[in-house]
Amino acid sequence: MPARARRHWLFKSDPGSFGWEDLLACPGRTTFWDGVRNYQARNLLRDEVRAGDGVLFYHSSSDPPAVVGLAEVVGEARTDPTQFERGHEHEDPGSDPAAPRWLGVDVRATCSLPRPLPLAALKAEPALSRMLVVQRGQRLSIQPLTPEEWALVLRLGGVEAEMPSPEERPRGRR
DNA sequence: GCCAACGTTGGC
DNA sequence: GCCAACGTTGGC
């Protein structure tokens, strides 16, 4: 079976609820990406997003909105338990535990962008004009990217290699 | 199945 | 704070 090509995504997050710094502070710089409550995004998690895929971490509703970091998908999508938590803001009483409606996935921070890329900078690049995030009214929280878009965003963001910078590297190795 | 009303997202 | 765009709901 041929290996599946690595794919690339943009994940939106409102830093008022969970931002890049929060991800860096998580154990293993990894968190379960929950709260997706949109069928199109859910279908991407279920059908397209795979372990090892690249993720642009995007701050929405911030000033300015911007791509601020890189992450990678860890493991496969799995049931989002918050849909069944009584009183949770993401509870979905209509979801059947025998056939859960909503999924989440683990993501691990890879590196901060040396130059965070504001939305305006993305819009200024003709080669990025097809990215969903620059489209007016686009609300999808998990968006596919082409390999070319991924590479260009990394170049514009000053990423030379997808590695944690020395000050971000986890301790306790070597 | 249509579509108006509504709630939410998210840039500005 | 405003409001355009969008997705969902629910009456019919």
Image (cartoon, coloured by chain):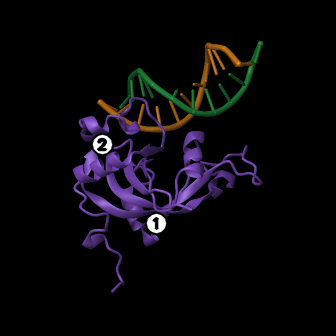
Chain colours: A purple, B orange, C green
Chain designation of label 2: A
Residue name at image x 72 percent, y 47 percent:
A95
Of A56 and C1, which appears nearest the observer? A56
**Residue placed most toward the observer, A105 or C9:** A105
Residue A116 in the figure: left or right of residue A14: left
- Residue A77: tell me if it is visible: yes
Would you identify the image quadrant in which residue A105 lies? bottom right
Residue A23 at x, y = what percent?
Answer: 41, 62
Residue A160 found in image quarter: bottom left
Q: CA distance from mark 2 to mark 1?
A: 25 Å
Give the side of residue A40 with respect to residue A135, left or right.
right
Mark 2 nearby-residue class (10 Å; few <14, some 14–19, many ≥20): few
Picture coordinates of residue A57, whole percent (x, y): 38, 52
Q: Amino acid at mark 2?
A: Asp
Q: Identify residue type, mark 1.
A: Thr
At mark 2, the secondary structure is loop
- Residue for badge 1: A30
Residue visible at 31% across and 39% down in the picture: A128
> Could you confirm whether marks 2 and 1 are on the same chain?
yes
Q: Secondary structure at mark 1?
A: strand
Q: Chain of mark 1?
A: A
Q: Is residue A32 visible?
A: no
Q: Nearer the viewer, residue A55 or A116?
A: A55
The residue indicated by pointer 2 is: A63
Vertical side of A90 occupied by A168: above or below: below
Label 1 crowd bin: few (<14), some (14–19), many (20+), radius 10 Å: many
Mark 2 or 1: the one toward you? 1
On the rendered image, what quadrant is the C terminus of chain A found in? bottom left
